[in-house]
Image (cartoon, rainbow, N blue to C red):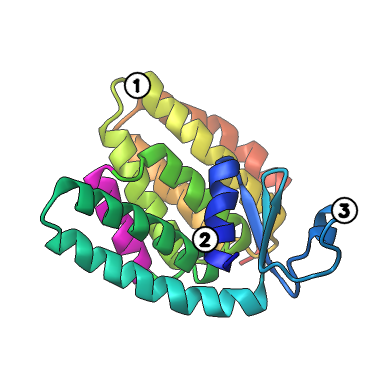
Amino acid sequence: MAVIDRLNAAFREDPLIDEYALVPSASAALFGRTAGGEEDLGCVAEEHKLALSIEAALVLYLHSYQAMSQASQSMSSSSTAEERRAAAESAAAASRAVLLCSADCSSAWDCRQNLLQEGTVELEAELAFSALLLRTNHKSGETWAQRRRLLESAMRGAEDDDTCARLAVSELAVIEELAKRYDHHYYAWNHWAWLSRQTAGASSMATSLLDDHFPKLAYATDRKS
């Protein structure tokens, strides 16, 4: 089975994958499985975690970038809704693979933004995917920028103050997780400042929650840049 097929199957079988790593060899033994032994499968997943071998990632990136470009062109030239839907699904899978290999690929993020507007991918799922990427690529400026675009859309669509506050609390949990995980987390702190500014005029409840939670976050982490 090709690596892209393994990757797509992994996300189909476990949509809750929340973390991944590039490793020298993606074998079943990484997760304590004896079947398959030490053979590099290119991609292996278990318990919401994904391992992608470095060697496979190099090939996967080149293949998926080309596939993403072709699928995007097909979306524009499709004559039927069915063809357009198939091309969009191919673009979604290919752009996901590209970003797992290179989180700062702006072309892939542009592709996913178009897919979001098309309705092929969902806002909540995109927030979860960007969080997955940030757990490994915490200094990816493109990923942080896309996350802000997603949050802006979510906050604009928030029906009431409570919804906006829940979004802020959920985002704060991601920020705190990353700030605790990495010593050099300027991007996470910068994102907190952005979130604070964003909610200031949108939700008094969210602003209050962020202000109340900030001291706890500050004392729990080392704010070195």
Screen quadrant of the C terminus:
bottom right
> What x and y, as percent, mark residue 125?
44, 41
Residue 32 got which mark?
A: 3
The answer to whether residue 68 is left or right of residue 180 is left
> What x and y, as percent, mark residue 181?
70, 54
Mark 1 lies on residue: 161
Dot 2 crowding, Cα within 10 Å, few <14, some 14–19, many 20+: some
In the displayed image of the protein, which residue is found farthest to the front? 1
Closest to the observer, 85 or 52: 85
Q: CA distance from mark 3 to mark 1?
A: 46 Å
Which range is magenta?
Answer: 106-119
Name the amino acid type tagged 2. Tyr
The answer to whether residue 199 is left or right of residue 177 is left
Residue 187 got which mark?
A: 2
Dot 3 or dot 1: first in sequence order is 3
* Residue at screen point 85% across, 60% down: 29
Tell me the element at label 2.
Answer: helix
